[in-house]
Image (cartoon, helix red, strand yellow):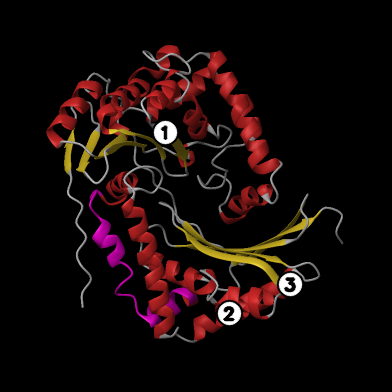
């Protein structure tokens, strides 16, 4: 029996200043989510000037032309709302969830920081948030177990100058060297209405919501068009090995491969490969390494999908008394087995069920990271069609066992990958 077709109805329009707007009614709860995507992430930065996109994720909460510092969060909390933002290589997003009777407050706040952030941003503000970002980097990378390895992985996978080479949070010397004028130029270039898309989803009446969006965003000045990103393909010619030390108790093994970009052929098949290898306690690597042999403390696998180039990552931590070499031997055996023999129908069904369960769980939420508003914005950005839910899930259903086997064989060669090992300081 065919699965029911998913349809998420929406209304779409573009303001004269270039802002693309998507409205979706969902009256299941009296809440509304205002979700803004700026089509800029760390990939739009350049060597020597990294960390700007993430820095703006902080600056955007520090007051704007008609909102004093501190009032953004204060007003939302008083209204019973919450908000947050996140930065990735390819985009920066901001979301505000509020009771539906506070929609106009959310639109006012979001429009004010788009149109009038620079009215109140000063060198002192930038310096203060620059220090906050540096502290965040220390907490998330320098002082977090295995944190530096996460940065090293990107540097090994992508060559110098590639926009995925540097970490999203940026390098410390770049954050220090950035001038106030550098920061202002970055904002003027990428935070204009024409380089953004806005989703308003939840307990709304479409015509009323449209009127409010036009009222609050209509006077934001347009910016110059942003050139689309192009980047030559990247490839690994052989095995790149590196061992680093860290203040950790146990070693960790990371194996990474360059894989097709998000939504490209084989991207979905590699999601299934990841689930079969390490997606839960019945997966091949978890069952063998953690449960049967009891030589690993943890193991994970994932297809990390990105716009320009993705990477497939397997990470494993040995139990005390065991080594990363033991784990790598078993991991390579299981990869080779999947490359040589198609998975069983039972395995395929289990992985499809995992993908579908995760997909529908995300659809149940309107707001927040990964909720329906965020997904409408993601699909619009990636495909031009906000209601791409059915097509997205449809990438998985037609996959055969031989498709999964072929993806593992083509994209996970043992002779072309990054092998990164983190060893405890002082270990031999």
- Quick one: 363 or 59, which is closer to the camera? 363
Q: CA distance from mark 2 to mark 1?
A: 43 Å
- The image shows residue 290, relative to residue 226, as above or below, that is below
Is disc 2 placed on a helix, strand or loop? helix
In front of the other: label 3 or label 1?
Answer: 1
Task: Report the mark closest to the observer, 2 or 1.
Answer: 1
Identified at 36% across, 54% down, the residue is: 362
355 on left or right of 422: left
Q: In this orientation, does residue 112 appear?
A: yes
Which of the two discs, 3 and 2, labels the residue nearer the N terminus?
Answer: 3
Q: Which residue bears the numbered disc 2?
A: 334
Helix, strand or loop at disc 1? strand
Q: Residues within 10 Å of mark 2 (few under 14, many from 20)?
A: some
Q: Which numbered dot is residue 325?
A: 3
Which residue position is annotated with label 1?
A: 83
Q: Is residue 291 left or right of residue 213?
A: right
Taking the magenta stretch, the answer to whether it contains residue 198 is no
The quadrant of the image that shows the N terminus is: bottom left
* x, y percent for residue 73: 44, 24
Q: Which residues are magenta?
A: 384-408
**Sequence-earlier tag: 3 or 1:** 1
Kindly tell me whether residue 414 is visible in this rendering. no
Placement of 348 over or under 252, stated as above or below: below
């Amino acid at each position: 029996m065919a699965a029911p077709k998913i349809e998420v109805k929406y209304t779409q329009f573009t303001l004269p200043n270039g802002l693309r707007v998507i409205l979706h009614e969902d009256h299941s709860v009296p809440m509304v989510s205002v979700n803004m995507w700026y089509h800029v992430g760390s990939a739009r930065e350049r060597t020597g000037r990294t960390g700007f996109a993430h820095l703006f994720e902080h600056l955007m909460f520090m007051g704007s032309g008609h909102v004093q510092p501190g009032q953004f969060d204060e007003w939302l909390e008083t209204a019973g709302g919450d908000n947050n933002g996140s930065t990735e290589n390819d985009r920066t997003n901001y979301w505000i969830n509020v009771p539906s009777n506070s929609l106009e407050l959310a639109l006012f706040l979001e429009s004010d920081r788009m149109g009038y952030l620079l009215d109140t941003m000063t060198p002192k503000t930038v310096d203060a948030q620059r220090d906050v970002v540096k502290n965040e980097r220390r907490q998330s990378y320098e002082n977090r177990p295995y944190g530096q390895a996460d940065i090293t992985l990107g540097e090994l996978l992508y060559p110098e100058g590639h926009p995925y080479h540097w970490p999203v949070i940026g390098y410390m010397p770049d954050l220090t060297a950035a001038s106030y004028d550098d920061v202002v130029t970055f904002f003027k270039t990428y935070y204009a209405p024409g380089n953004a898309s806005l989703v308003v989803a939840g307990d709304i009446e479409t015509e009323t919501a449209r009127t409010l969006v036009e009222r609050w965003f209509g006077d934001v000045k347009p910016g110059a068009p942003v050139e689309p990103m192009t980047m030559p393909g990247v490839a690994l010619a052989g095995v790149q090995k590196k061992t680093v030390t860290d203040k950790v108790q146990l070693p960790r093994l990371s194996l990474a491969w360059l894989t097709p970009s998000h939504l490209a052929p084989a991207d979905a098949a590699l999601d299934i490969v990841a689930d079969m290898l390490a997606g839960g306690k019945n997966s091949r690597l978890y069952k063998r390494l953690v449960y049967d042999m009891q030589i690993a403390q943890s193991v994970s696998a994932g297809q990390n999908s990105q716009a320009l180039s993705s990477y497939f990552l397997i990470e494993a931590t040995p139990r005390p008394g065991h080594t990363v070499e033991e784990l790598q031997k078993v991991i390579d055996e299981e990869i080779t087995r999947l490359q040589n023999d198609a998975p069983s129908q039972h395995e395929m069904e289990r992985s499809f069920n995992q993908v579908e369960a995760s997909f529908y769980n995300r659809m149940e939420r309107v707001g927040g990271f990964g909720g329906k508003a965020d997904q409408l914005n993601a699909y619009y950005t990636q495909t031009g069609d906000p209601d791409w839910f059915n097509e997205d899930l449809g990438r998985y259903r037609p996959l055969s066992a031989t498709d999964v086997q072929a993806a593992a064989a083509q994209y996970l060669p043992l002779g072309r990958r990054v092998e990164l090992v983190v060893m405890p300081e002082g270990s031999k």
